[in-house]
Image (cartoon, rainbow, N blue to C red):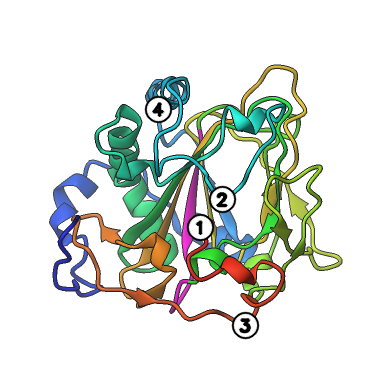
Amino acid sequence: MTQSKPRPSPAACGDDDVAMHQLTRRQPSATDVEAYRHQGFLIARGLFPAGEISDLGDAAMAQAGLGPVPGLYDEYHHFGSDDPLSRFPRMLMPHRQRGLEIGWLAESMRFDARLHGWLRALLGENPCAAQSMFYFKPPGSRGQDMHQDDFYLRTSPGSCLAAWIAVDRADDENGGLRLAVGSHRLPLLPTRQADLTTSFTDDGVDVPAGMALAAPELDPGDVLFFGGAMIHGSGPNRSRGRFRCSFICHYVGASTTHINPWNRPVECFDRGVIDIAEAPIGPWQDSFAGHAQRSRPH
């Protein structure tokens, strides 16, 4: 088990990575950051080369073909034998599987220098990694109802930040993401039962009336950033033969003091582990999905 180091100060966390950070050729502009503040999400086009992303996808596919690995796959949802997700359930925290190729690739990518500048600019402080996931979303599979990530991560103070990395092309036909524009300004909303014919998760939130939905199309290597209050989700993969693989990491600022214990340890880019307490159950964690919320993953 990782030994926790003394909590780094928010100002110092990540300073050991200065040389690595300088390798980053692209940084968000002031206009990018303003757009993010306004609409609640931002896309960094082509942040990763397609070939590099293909290696990650190939490793995930190869691992899926080898059968179950304790602690790697989603064990919180059960799928029938005819459900495409029974063969390709999402990977949760693949970076913890250091002995597997997908594990060390996930670990490397979540601390990649090309992400650091974007994360720091959007968080307003040094970023620390709290979670990783790999979604396969094979043809015919259900999507995920609209939700807010911080309902699950329970980040405090502030909000988490997702870096959603497209491994395959993502569009409406194969179940690309939909985001409620401006919903990042909302509090966490009460959950309700999801439509299980279109969503593999059993809870969701309603998009407020009049709020527009964005459905960005992403190519392999594009990175979509959005915060923990952003209402987002996806529909089923209606394509005949296209997967919609994606690798998602969640980050928090170095000043974060509380989080869902399932997300610990939380590490900065210099691999310092911050001292972070268990977040209390929030105002809506006692609603529909709240029964398992104390340690429920995203």
Residue matched to label 3: 283
Q: Tell me the distance, in whole angstroms, between the alpha carbons under discs 1 and 4.
A: 23 Å
Residue 265: image quadrant is bottom left
Q: Which circle marks residue 76 in the picture?
A: 2
Give coordinates of residue 66: x percent, y percent: 42, 21
Residue matched to label 4: 56
- Vertically, is 108 above or below 188? above
Choose mark 2 or mark 4, whichever is in front: 2
- Choose between 253 and 156: the one closer to the eye: 156
Closer to the chain start, of discs 2 and 4, is: 4
| Residue type at the position of mark 1 | Pro
- Vertically, is 40 above or below 99? below
| Residue type at the position of mark 4 | Leu
Q: Tell me the distance, in whole angstroms, between the alpha carbons under discs 3 and 1.
A: 18 Å
Residue matched to label 1: 297
Query: Which quadrant does the N terminus fall into?
Result: bottom left
Give coordinates of residue 76: x percent, y percent: 56, 50
Which residues, given as a range, are shown in magenta?
A: 155-166
> In percent of the image, x 40 and y 34: which residue is there?
69
- Vertically, is 214 above or below 246? below
Q: Residues within 10 Å of mark 3 (few under 14, many from 20)?
A: few
Circles 2 and 4: CB atoms closer than 8 Å: no
Closer to the chain start, of discs 3 and 1, is: 3
* Secondary structure at numbered mark 2: loop
> In percent of the image, x 85 and y 65: which residue is there?
210
Q: Tell me the distance, in whole angstroms, between the alpha carbons under discs 2 and 4.
A: 24 Å
Q: Residues within 10 Å of mark 1 (few under 14, many from 20)?
A: some
| Residue type at the position of mark 2 | Tyr
> In percent of the image, x 78 and y 63: which residue is there?
207
| Residue type at the position of mark 3 | Pro
Choose mark 1 or mark 4, whichever is in front: 1
